Amino acid sequence: MASFVVMEPPVRDPAEKAVLVRDGFHVFGLLIPFVWFAFHRMWREAALALAAAIALSVAGAYAGLGGATGWLSLLVGVYVGLEGAALRIASLKRSDWNEWGVVEARSAADAEIRYLADREVIVATETPPRVMAPWSRTAPAARHSGPALGLFGYPGAK
């Protein structure tokens, strides 16, 4: 079973526009990280991944590594494949989306059904907020200043 992180947008009815982010390895993030970022509308991350891949390739060519420069730029793809879901969740959080929770399911469709069912149960069981009694304005009791950790007393303490 896979785990899906449910992200809700800051709108009136967030259940209709919620996004399920599968936690795990993303193969397309490994193969084509810039396109994967662009597909998920993560423009900053796409630019940073492209710049990092180019910088690693140039650094490898400058160091005289020859054919290893392609392997160096593949490191960006490995990172995106492993951490793509976390980067997507962070991107949504920067856009003021709320993390609702985690749902475990076999597929995204099953995860969506479980999320909607759990959301309905939680909304139905919510209780109205309690009204708190006002604070009493009595003076605090006098504190006894004894010795600190039982070692010494303070001069002038009662």
Image (cartoon, rainbow, N blue to C red):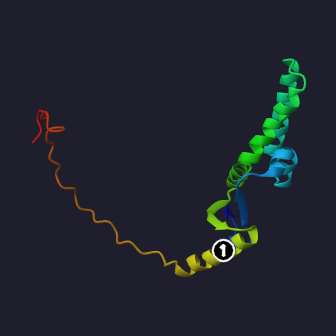
Mark 1: few/some/many CA within 10 Å (<14, 14-19, 20+): some
Residue 121 % position (x, y): 58, 79
The quarter holding residue 67 reads: top right
Residue 31 % position (x, y): 86, 46
Q: Please give the name of the residue rendered at 69% of the width and 54% of the height, measured from the top-left corner.
A: 89
Q: Secondary structure at mark 1?
A: helix
Residue 73 % position (x, y): 84, 34
Q: Please give the name of the residue rendered at 56% of the width and 81% of the height, measured from the top-left corner.
A: 124
Of residues 110 and 41, the one drawn nearer to the viewer in this rendering: 110
154 relative position to 73: left or right: left
Of residues 82 and 92, the one drawn nearer to the viewer in this rendering: 82
70 relative position to 92: left or right: right
20 relative position to 99: left or right: right
Q: Is residue 48 visible?
A: no
- Quadrant where the N terminus is found in the figure: bottom right
Q: Amino acid at mark 1?
A: Arg
Q: Please give the name of the residue rendered at 68% of the width and 64% of the height, measured from the top-left corner.
A: 10
Of residues 14 and 116, the one drawn nearer to the viewer in this rendering: 116
Residue 108 % position (x, y): 74, 68
The quarter holding residue 130 reads: bottom left
Rendered position, 39 above or below 58: below
User: Which residue matches tag 1?
Assistant: 114
Q: Is residue 105 visible?
A: yes
Q: Please give the name of the residue rendered at 62% of the width and 75% of the height, measured from the top-left corner.
A: 119
- Quadrant where the C terminus is found in the figure: top left
